[in-house]
């Protein structure tokens, strides 16, 4: 099924309007991270390693509404952390739906059965369940057994209650094309409304640095998967065909990081969902003051292997609007999985990586402590092996 027709039409009209008005940079999907706290400790994610005082921060309902009002994107993707740990999540979703936005609520599904009746089915609302492959692949990815089974149960429950349900699947360098294709077949049989797939980005703080894909491996992996599904036509991907075409090595796009602006408890994240190199107080400041040319493949070492949808989907959508016949040909014929690949952007002159993370954490901690009465802040609980929710978080999840 993929992207519902109404959603595709509304987003297409929005993009065409931006192009016609000559707007150089505009957002497509607001990436909202209203908290970093999670109830899993996945190997490919470094977020639950923040100090407890930061993990206990939340964006309020007002903060979340202000974020969409400031940026005006037609779609909001709510991630984290685990969004279902946020006590005000139902009001946040409702607020966005009332504003006519399409809402994608990403979850690891561990709390979905408990929380599902706080939400109502709507054509504009989709649960996006985190599933990084079949049982063996996913439970390994999230470092806990039994999570795959719970996620599949949650998908069945949400479908039975009339919700739109998709999965978001991140692949690493141990993904096997045949197994992944078989997994997509199984997911399609569950009656999913969509599949979002992306190669993992090598977060510098992720505990497991061994299993991220480089660009060549990413393209080979996606060719191997898509070749087993009629060039991708077998599965209900929610992404544009042109983005999948890019993953298969048939395009060499520059990223469009402002297409998916990211609002977290730190502020508006510069330059993108994947890199936190600085924070702006407002969306305007993010757009006006970010030195965009310093980032992207070929410009910055941390970007060299990035092919993630949050950076390149907007590039693919723009290409589709500019070259509709090329996009139509890819859609009709399926994605090419053989033959030469597009020449990639050279990385010989990229600037070296800067490591600025700890400075942002210290700044945020200072802000939090300054805003509290003296002596009231909790001591930091560091992660040693696994992240455990703080006592107030257990309450928040109830
Ligand atoms: S290439 Fe760099 S700037 Fe662009 S989306 Fe990826 S990490 Fe972000």
Image: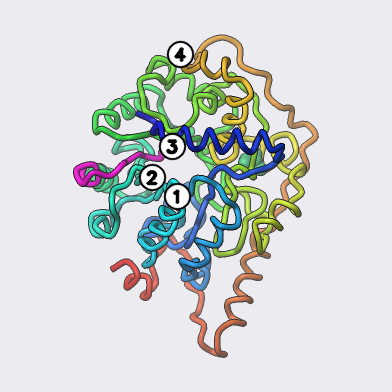
Q: Position of residue 71 (x, y in %)?
A: 60, 53
Residue at (38% x, 58% y) in the render: 94
Q: Residue at x 35, y 20 (%)?
A: 234
Marker disc for residue 7: 3
Per the image, label 1 sits on a secondary structure element best described as loop
Extent of the magenta region: 156-168
Q: How many marks?
A: 4
Q: Residue furthest top?
A: 339
For the residues carrying marks 1 and 4, which lies nearer the camera in this image? 1
Q: Which residue is mark 2?
A: 124
The tag earlier along the polypeptide, 2 or 4, is 2
User: Above or below — where is 241 with respect to 41?
Assistant: above
- Mark 1–mark 3 Cα distance, whole angstroms, equals 11 Å
The residue that label 4 is drawn on is 332
Residue 349 is tagged as: none
First-in-chain label (2 vs 3): 3
Q: Quadrant of the N terminus?
A: top left
Q: Position of residue 361 (x, y in %)?
A: 61, 66
**Residue position for label 1:** 100
């Amino acid at each position: 099924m993929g992207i519902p027709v109404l959603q595709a039409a509304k987003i297409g009209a929005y993009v065409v309007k931006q192009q016609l008005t000559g707007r150089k940079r505009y957002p497509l999907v607001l990436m909202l991270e209203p908290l970093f706290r999670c109830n899993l400790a996945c190997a490919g994610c470094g977020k639950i390693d923040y100090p407890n005082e930061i993990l206990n921060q939340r964006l309020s309902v007002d903060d979340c509404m202000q974020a969409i009002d400031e940026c005006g994107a037609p779609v909001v993707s709510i991630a984290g952390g685990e969004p279902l740990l946020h006590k005000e999540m139902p009001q946040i979703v409702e607020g966005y739906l009332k504003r006519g936005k399409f809402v994608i609520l990403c979850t690891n599904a561990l709390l979905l059965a408990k929380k599902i009746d706080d939400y109502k089915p709507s054509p504009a609302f989709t649960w996006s369940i985190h599933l990084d492959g079949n049982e063996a692949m996913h439970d390994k990815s999230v470092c806990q057994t039994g999570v795959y089974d719970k996620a599949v149960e949650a998908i069945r429950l949400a479908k039975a209650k009339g919700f739109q349900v998709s999965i978001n699947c991140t692949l690493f360098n141990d993904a096997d094309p045949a197994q992944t294709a078989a997994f997509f077949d199984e997911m399609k049989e569950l009656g999913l409304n969509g599949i979002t797939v992306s190669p993992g980005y090598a977060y510098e703080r992720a505990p497991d640095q061994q299993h991220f894909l480089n660009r060549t491996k990413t393209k080979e992996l996606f060719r191997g998967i898509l070749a087993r599904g009629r060039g991708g036509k077998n599965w209900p991907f929610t992404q544009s065909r042109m983005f999948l075409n890019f993953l298969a090595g048939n395009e060499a796009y520059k990223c469009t990081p402002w297409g998916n602006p990211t609002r977290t408890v730190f502020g508006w994240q510069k330059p993108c969902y994947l890199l936190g190199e600085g924070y702006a107080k407002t969306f305007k400041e993010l757009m006006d003051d970010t030195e965009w040319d310093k980032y992207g493949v070929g410009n910055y070492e941390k970007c060299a292997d990035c092919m993630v949808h949050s950076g390149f989907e907007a590039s693919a959508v723009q290409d589709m609007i500019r070259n509709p016949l090329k996009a139509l040909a890819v859609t009709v014929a399926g994605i090419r999985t053989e033959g030469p690949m597009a020449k990639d952007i050279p990385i010989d002159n990229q600037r070296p990586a800067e490591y600025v993370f700890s400075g942002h954490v210290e700044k945020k901690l200072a802000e939090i402590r300054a805003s509290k009465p003296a002596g009231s802040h909790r001591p930091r609980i560091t992660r040693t092996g696994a992240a455990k929710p703080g006592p107030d978080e257990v309450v928040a999840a109830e």
